[in-house]
Amino acid sequence: MQIGIIGMKFTGKTTLFNAITGAQQPTGQGGVEAHRAVGKIPDPRLDVLTEMFKPKRTVHATVEWVDIPGFAGGAGPDGGREATRFLELGRKVDALAQVVRCFDGGYGEPAPLDELESMALELILTDLQVVENRLEKLAKDKARMGKVANPLEPPCFERLKDQLEDNRPLRELDLNPDETKLVSGFAFLTLKPLMVILNHPEGEEPGEDVRQAAADMASEVVSLCANVEEELAQLDPAEAGEFLADLGIEEPALALMIRAAYGALDQQSFFTVGPDECRAWTVGKHASAPEAAGAIHSDLQRGFIRAEVTAYDDLVAAGSLAAAKAANKVRLEGKAYAVQDGDIIEIRFSV
């Protein structure tokens, strides 16, 4: 799972990136290079399972954060849009997290509503260019050969063009399965799940108008102070806990961002346990048992027979897997089973 952190220049993107990854990238310089870091996804349930099974190793699920360089918007020196070369990086990630400046910090009066509008426009214009290029190619194909390879493609891309020209993101367009398949290879930015991160000064929450505007355009909204979160990330867990309590912060930024990312991408976790390894895995909500098996290894999905499933709460209440089996809390599920968040799964397979 890759999350691209985007935003205008000097919004605190890299400060937030440092806070949630433990990196130490220089901030406030408006760089042009992307920063990348893979971080563990904290999950207290995995800690409980580790204590229960005492495995040789514990493996957390991971997420890759990509700090995509910010931009000022408008036309670049080459006459093109400055955003284009930066947002191309966004095509390679699974979701976008836009950081919005709600603080002064020496950069002038914040304008979060303008930032939200400007970024939305940049994303739309970038996608519109791709759509127009595709329609132009389809027109040339038809002129040369008298037809296009897929007759469904021109009307589909005309729909995309109309949507974008109305200044509306593609994620708001109701695409049928055929259209979804047609556009899947283009990695449109406005089709990607979007989170908005409102970066505010310590002790000052963003106004309701900003919150509402963010909620209107994003699937998830997180409000935090990146400077405070970066300080927290540099403390040991005990000190960080005291600092959080003193500031009245319930959760650190990493937990907030992970939950928002899971919500935006409709993701959930399941676990495999045993004396050798306790491990968290990430799959989409409503994923089938064979799809969960495939997340572990393709051979398990190919040779799937049954899944032995225990709900996390049932296992913890029983105290052990043997006790859960004795209490009839372990069940066998087939190919149609939809995995639930927190399931403990053992795959039976044959290849």
Image (cartoon, rainbow, N blue to C red):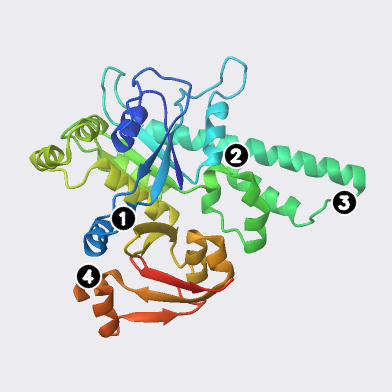
Give the mark nearer the N terminus: 2 vs 1: 1
How many C-alpha atoms fall within 10 Å of the one at disc 4: few (<14), some, or many (≥20)?
A: some
The nearer-to-camera label among 4 and 1 is 1
- Find disc 2 in the rendering and name its residue: 127
* First in sequence: mark 4 vs mark 1: 1
Work out whether residue 155 or residue 4 is closer to the camera in this orientation and state it: 4
> Considering depth in this image, is 294 or 12 the residue closer to the camera?
294
Residue at (86, 46) in percent of width and height: 142
Label 2 Cα neighbours within 10 Å, binned few <14 / some 14-19 / many ≥20: many
| Secondary structure at numbered mark 1 | loop
Provide residue 344's location: percent of width, then percent of height.
35, 68
Residue 56, disc: 1
Disc 1 from disc 3: Cα separation: 61 Å
- Residues packed near mark 3 inside 10 Å, few (<14), some (14 to 19) or many (20 plus): few
- In the picture of the structure, the residue carrying the numbered disc 4 is 316
Q: Amino acid at mark 4?
A: Val
Name the residue at 58% across, 35% down: 125
Q: Which residue is under mark 3?
A: 147
